[in-house]
Image (cartoon, rainbow, N blue to C red):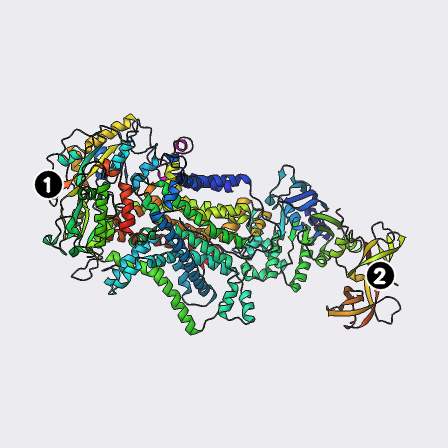
Amino acid sequence: MAIAALETVAPATSSSTPPKKRGSLGGVIIWLVLTLLIIAPVASFLILGVSPRVFQQGSQWFTLTYVRQALSSYFGRGIFNSLWVSTTVAILSVSLATALAWLIHRTNVGGRRFWAPAMWLLLMMPTWMMTLGWSDLLQPFGAAQALGINTHWIYGEFFGPMGIVIVLTSAALPFAYFIVSAGLQGLGPEYEDAARIHGAGPLRSLQTVLPIIAPALLSALAISFAETMSDFGVAFTLGYHSNFPMATYVLFSAISNFPANFSVAAVIAAVLIVATIPPIVLQSHVMRKRSYAVLSGRTRAPRRRELARGPRVMATTAVAAVFAVALGVPILGAVIGSLVKNLGIDSPNGVHWTLSYYAQIFKPSIQGDSLGAPLLLSNQLGLVVATGTGVLAVILARRLVANPGSWSQRVTDVFLLGSVAVPGVVLGVGYIFFYNLSFISHNVISIYKTLPLLMLALVANAVPGQTRFMAGPVSQIQPSLGEAARVHGAGRLRAWRTTNLPLMSRVLLWGWLLTFTKTIAELAISQILYPPSQEPASVSIQSYLANFAPNTGTAMTVLTLFEMLAVIGIALSVYRLVTPNGWRRVGWSGVQS
Amino acid sequence: MERGSVVSESMRRAVGVSVNALAKVFGDKRALDDVSISVEPGTFLVLLGPSGSGKTTLLRCVAGIERPSSGTISIGGNVVVGGKTFVPPERRRLAMVFQDYALWPHLTVRKNVAYPLATSSLEKSERGARCDDLLERVGISHLADRYPNELSGGEQQRVALARALAAEVGLILFDEPLSNLDADRREQLRIEIATLTREAGATAIYITHDQSEAFALADQIGVLNLGRLVQFDTPENIYRHPHDAFVARFTGVAGEFPVHVKRLLGDDRVVVALPFSSSHTIEASSNESLKPDADVSLFVRASGVSLAAPAHDEGVRGLIRDVAFNGRGYDHVVDVGEGFTLTKIFATTKFDRGRNVKICFDPSACFVMDPTREVSK
Amino acid sequence: MTLVALAATLASMSYVVAAGSAGASSNPGFVLYSSQGYDHASVTAFNATHPGFTVTLNDNSTGPLLQQIQAEGNNPKWGVLWVDGASAFAQLDGEGKLLHNSVPKVKFNALGLQNVPKDGSFAPTGLTVTGALCYDSSQITAAQLPSTWAQLNSAQFRGKVGMNDPSQSGPTYPMIAGIMQYMGKYKSGSTAKAVAAGESYYKALKANGLVVNSTNGPTIAAMEAHTISMATVQSSACYGAALTNFPSMKVKYLNPSIALPSVMGIDGKQPKMVREDAQKFVDWVLSARGQHVMQTGDPQGDSLFWPVIKGENPSNAIIPPLSSTHAISTNPYTWGKLETQVNTWFDSNIVNG
């Protein structure tokens, strides 16, 4: 699923009274909404793992056949591969992210203005776009060759576990980075100072403070793990080609036949979800009763360590190299790939550059196959889904941080992380099962095969990630700010609007943009749930890539990417123009270096 | 305008607060247990107690940002909490100064101060004038266009104070406003709080765990412990007649010793033998009915102990363990033998470390009480 | 505040109500689930000339369409299904979901007739050939090509042959089924021997460097990249590539190749009015007008088919006579049942072996 947490973790302050308990009616409504949105559809799918007859997928009310099937040979191999790849990627991405976060936030490494936007771009880029870029770049007669670089030797290696780990680590890097950054922000300079005064060199002082940000590290590990487990893009492209089946791929192949084996897929999905429980339990155990964060407005920015010239150049180069590999390479590959005529052809005339694929986007040969209408629809979807998700995520985030360490907070936490691990296709098909039930369509709501259903599913896909994303920043807001507004005459709404909203405005904006871009790029759910004649852009692109015109498909991809960037740019400019100065002063590590 | 009418106008603004049988339970913890307090209009009430005593909870219940489990609260004669009634904070016409200042980081100082005026009936120009006046009064006019994170702690708390005064309400609440400040700032700001609040003619409820702060500010003090109101009285009475051992300890004892009651003198006075100098007895007061030979403790206020040269006729022998200069004189730690010490014994002249001294006790500053009994009045 | 926000969310999300449920028309029409390239043109043309009801087009790839149908279970939303290959229909018929005797009364040619089932529960609407040997004539001449399936396995073609993955590419399983039928000399009865024969064939191909890609797109791209010089794909895919970007693409038909019909079937569980509407559509598709729209609706893609109607010719000269293709049919009832098993075997042993 989509975006995951950007949390801050710092030692709990001595708040003299526990926070107010929420009205239980609000809680019931929220869980009702979550049930309709996530729990019911996913459960509808998962139950088939042991009870296929529930949705007419088999004759048995209870059986373990599919459990056995899922854990053996082909499917079992996929699960096993995913487990170790996810673990490896989690460790790699968190290590890399910690080093990056340290350099960027705590030293005077160069280029700091660029790294935060670059991380955001990396966060927004879907993995299938990344692999597309990499293959366009590395394939024989691919983009690299068009630039004169021979990549034959690496092509074979890349299409294997190595490439899979590289791309997935790139994809997980931003999640880990933002969490660790926020954890570092809450870490005052006094710990390192104390270590250094007592004789520790830079490496040892880093070792000293690492345990203090251990909860942030564990949280980053858990999220990276969950996100990687549920990734579909790499599993489907790189994993497929490299004879390295991953869980999401084998799940997909289980339901690609007709009749589809939903039951085996359900067991695999259950394994994916359950696999995320250990990391979150571990994190929870370490955090115990610590609140998600309380970062008071009085926290001073930690000092930056001044690096000497030589180390500074090295550090800047290292950081730039990471971004170049993770981000630059795929973008370059895709852009060049879309501009080279007959990419991959050993043409006797050498490389032939062309814009013809872009032209084909708007003048397709098949009626109804242009990119214009789908792209417009995707933008509309993005708008509605991002807004709906934003509202819901704020409400949930407040609940999440309200009672740290409590039973209800833990349940919510585990639920949200587990939802991150649900592959999109499972959610999509689950929606069909649940919302096509006669009982539901006659008595609750009849929205199967409509645009609202697709929107709901996309919101469901985005909410868990965005909630955890907002939890950190939301919790950073001191409760006393709202209380001060109330006692000085503001009603609930005015107090929230004038004191909380401005402080969250940036977070809301970035969360919105993230969900917006993820919605446009989302494929699995869109493909299974889009209503008749209303095909989103990601589906159009996919059919071009799969059928006769892969180069046109690449061009469409690049165009979509730039369109998303344009929307982001516009949104940021509008924000800058419309919001008062004071709103933008409020610092948040996600958008500052 | 005549002084008399100014005074009476601001006095009219002040409201009384009445708390009745207030209780608050968090899970299995009783934060407040049957607390009843009555505050006259214009009084400066300080709630004093250690952390966990319930003072913050009580204040937050009065403010309306916490809901009590049972009991009633009235402000200015109107019931704000009771039975089915719950008046939300924004309608209680009060103001509050927070421990962490709670200034809105995205608003300038001026806008922070002007916030409570948004719901008032003043014209825009009048609001501006009132703001300027307040900023002037707390001495931060030059910071009006800055943002809170550009100010020092003391400056921020001044802004918070100005904000609390802006709406000219009849009740101002203070949640340990000085605890996050440096020592020198603390004194200064305490005086400003005291004067500005009284000038504004508001009733004040102020919480702190610092007894010297409480004594300096209060017209009335309510001492709280473990959710209960232990003593409610003037500072002088609390100091001179603590109800129980907890109050005595919390309001500062120089020493506490187990003693035997030798004689009852009547009028709540007794004679006890000192454990570290058996030949010496002293008089002390007691608010309990005691029997001779009862096991009690003697609590001695620092103000009731004076030092003299060893040659002095009266007094108990002692040895100076430590001496500290405090500007106006010296605080001494005196070892009186048998492992007992007296702390914070003031003298204008210095008695050096290791010197022998004579210690004299003033009976009015000595109390005898059951050390384990804690009153829950 | 929470309640207000939630209400606002729900309200803002239910803003689209109009689509699909407009007006209380007496005849609601039906939804066509189709993966055919000419379906937009067909539906538009049909709706224009049949004002009584509306056919709503749900166009998607075959995989998602079938997933939707299966997930809809006993509460189906589809009226007509139109995809390449009959195995899905055989499966649906086995589940009792298709309307019997819905085949229009037209004169089918021989291959057409072979693809009409006894209970008339689905009808062929056109034919392509799967297992067409698509090759890049700039890399390899016709003389150099293999003449038989067995020859495909020779050393000179090592690593030069490609195909699609049956679990991703719809037309591929029918080809494999046909190969199994051919290699195992299957006539009737148990398929075990035929399956085994086919499996060993593909295992040998794999050992000879067979390159498997997910669908037509990557396979053709591999040919363009000269990774492979030939691939067994669907005939229309190869002709389409030749007509658009790669004029050097040509097709050779090995003996046998496998006929792949585009097939239409009606959901038997729909109410009577819907079934009647659906029948009208099916009849129209096999009429002269419908066939014409099929042949012009996707001129560089699915329209490159052979008609199943006697005496009709393909739309494009690039397509040779049907007889030259040596096409045979496979029985979808027999081979449809084995699709999951074979595809899984293929995925485990050939794609990921």
Q: Is residue A188 above or below residue B87?
A: below
Residue C80: % across, % down: 26, 33
Q: Which residue is mark 1?
A: C323
Q: Nearer the viewer, residue B344 or B13?
A: B344
The answer to whether one can see residue A428 in this image is no
Q: In this image, A476 relative to B233: left or right?
A: left
Q: Is residue A62 above or below residue B305?
A: above
Q: Nearer the viewer, residue A417 or A254?
A: A254
Q: Which residues are magenta?
A: A438-451
Quarter of the image for the C terminus of chain A: give it.
bottom left
Q: Are marks 2 and 1 on the same chain?
A: no
Q: CA distance from mark 2 to mark 1?
A: 126 Å
Disc 2 crowd rating (10 Å Cα; few below 14, some 14-19, many 20+) is some
The answer to whether one can see residue B168 in this image is yes
Q: In this image, A288 relative to B343: left or right?
A: left
Residue B262: % across, % down: 88, 56
The chain holding disc 2 is B
